[in-house]
């Protein structure tokens, strides 16, 4: 360990002495620990890319909350779309004299097609570009 000399204000020396006495250690040990803390503080402020664990937990909690809200809104929209689609299908079946069995068969064929092609309907692909 290298020996150095530093000058500190009398009040700071008194405070450090009291801390050393309370912790049963020397002023040197307190000063070394303080310098290590300051070194780490400067590293984190100047060069570190690590996110503090507490900040990370807060951000993750916010993301989870937002995902839950998005899922709830999506589920409400999908439910409304399903209801509207069912109403339209009933009207079309009624007007075209399509039996319930045929309508169910058509639905199953559409589901099978979507599952076989592993395809998700995307509005940007079906709407014309303006």
Image: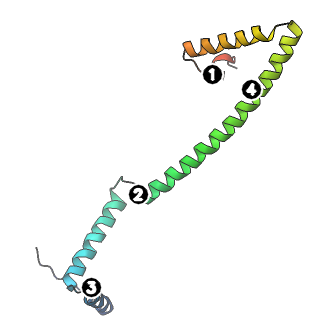
- Mark 2 = which residue? 53
**Quarter of the figure with residue 16:** bottom left
**The N terminus - image quarter:** bottom left
Residue 82, which numbered label? 4
Within-10-Å neighbours for mark 2: few <14, some 14–19, many 20+: few
- Mark 2 or 4 closer to N-term? 2
Q: Is residue 127 left or right of residue 35?
A: right
Which one is in front, 83 or 4? 83
| Residue 83: % across, % down | 78, 27
- Relative to 33, say whether 66 is above or below: above
Do the residues bearing badges 1 and 2 touch, measured as CB atoms within 8 Å? no
**Is residue 14 visible from the viewing direction of this image?**
yes
Query: How far, Cα to Cα, is label 3 from label 1?
Result: 66 Å
Do the residues bearing badges 2 and 3 touch, measured as CB atoms within 8 Å? no
Query: How far, Cα to Cα, is label 4 from label 3?
Result: 69 Å
- Mark 1 = which residue? 122
């Amino acid at each position: 360990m290298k020996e150095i000399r530093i000058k500190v204000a009398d009040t700071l020396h008194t405070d450090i002495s009291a801390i050393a006495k309370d912790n049963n250690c020397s002023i040197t040990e307190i000063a070394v620990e303080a310098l290590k803390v300051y070194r780490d503080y400067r590293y984190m402020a100047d060069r570190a890319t690590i996110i503090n664990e507490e900040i990370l937990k807060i951000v993750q909690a916010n993301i989870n909350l937002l995902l839950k809200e998005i899922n709830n809104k999506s589920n409400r929209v999908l439910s409304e779309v399903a209801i509207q689609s069912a109403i339209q299908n009933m009207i079309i079946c009624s007007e075209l004299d399509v039996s319930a069995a045929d309508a169910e068969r058509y639905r199953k064929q559409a589901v099978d097609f979507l599952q076989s092609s592993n395809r998700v309907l995307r509005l940007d692909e079906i709407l014309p570009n303006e």
